[in-house]
Image: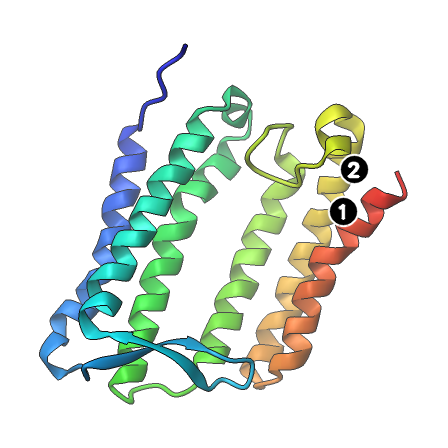
């Protein structure tokens, strides 16, 4: 049985994920004992955590998830045929964790109030990036739209990912201005439509 190893890039990006603690550490003594860590569709906090968990616990959990994702990626030789998506997998969690931690800290300090705009703008940017690389992704068991049809038929895989790439990119471009205008519900609708279109396409194949 082949032994699955973590690469230097895996460990470097895991360290980057841990670096998301830095914003909270810098202002730790100024943070309240309870910090809002979850927000509803109306941009209102509906979940809170202790200061220590928000600053240290969440990055540690995300680092563990990141390393697990890297191990799964390394376990599939076919992922190496899509190096761009492989890199996205490795940098996705570190970037998201740093943005989320920074936003939570700034919100706790009353420096920002519009968490929804930040979350949707980041989502839009990620969709544009991922959308540009989806068409280049080859069949594998970890990255991409993995269904029985796409994994068994390379042509369906390629067509589905070309469509998904176009839809994801277009949705990301639309979501960013909607987020800036605080049109959260339309932005979320665009997000879900972008996810559903490739799935409906698969049903016709």
**Image: 185 above or below 129:** below
Q: Are marks 2 and 1 in contact (CB under 8 Å)?
A: yes
Who's the residue at 52% across and 38% down the image? Answer: 85
Identity of the residue furthest to the right in this view: 204
Give the residue at mark 2.
159
The secondary element bearing badge 1 is classed as: helix
Identity of the residue furthest to the left in this view: 29
130 and 21: which one is in front?
21
**Image: 37 above or below 128:** below
**Count of numbered circles in the view:** 2
Give the residue at mark 1.
163
Mark 2 neighbour density, 10 Å: few (under 14) some (14–19) many (20 or more):
some
Q: Quadrant of residue 71?
A: top left
Is 151 on the left-hand or right-hand side of 63?
right
**Image: 30 above or below 200:** below
The x and y percentages for residue 49 are 29, 74
Who's the residue at 30% across and 48% down the image? Answer: 63
The x and y percentages for residue 131 are 62, 50
The secondary element bearing badge 2 is classed as: helix
Image quadrant where one finds the C terminus = top right
Mark 1 neighbour density, 10 Å: few (under 14) some (14–19) many (20 or more):
some
The x and y percentages for residue 15 are 23, 46
């Amino acid at each position: 049985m082949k032994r699955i190893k973590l690469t230097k890039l895996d460990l470097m990006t895991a360290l980057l994920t841990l670096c998301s603690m830095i914003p909270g550490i810098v202002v730790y003594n100024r943070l309240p004992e309870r910090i809002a860590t979850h927000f509803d569709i109306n941009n209102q906090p509906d979940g809170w955590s202790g200061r220590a968990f928000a600053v240290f616990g969440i990055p540690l959990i995300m680092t563990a998830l990141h390393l697990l994702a890297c191990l799964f990626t390394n376990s599939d030789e076919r992922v190496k045929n899509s190096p761009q998506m492989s890199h996205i997998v490795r940098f996705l969690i570190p970037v998201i964790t740093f943005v989320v931690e920074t936003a939570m800290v700034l919100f706790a300090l009353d420096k920002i109030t519009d968490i929804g705009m930040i979350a949707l703008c980041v989502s839009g940017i990620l969709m544009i990036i991922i959308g540009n690389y989806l068409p280049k992704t080859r069949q594998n068991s970890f990255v991409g739209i993995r269904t029985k049809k796409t994994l068994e038929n390379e042509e369906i895989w390629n067509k589905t990912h070309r469509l998904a790439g176009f839809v994801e990119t277009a949705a990301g471009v639309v979501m960013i201005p909607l987020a800036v205008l605080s049109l959260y519900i339309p932005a979320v609708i665009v997000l879900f439509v972008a996810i559903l279109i490739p799935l409906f396409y698969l049903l016709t194949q």
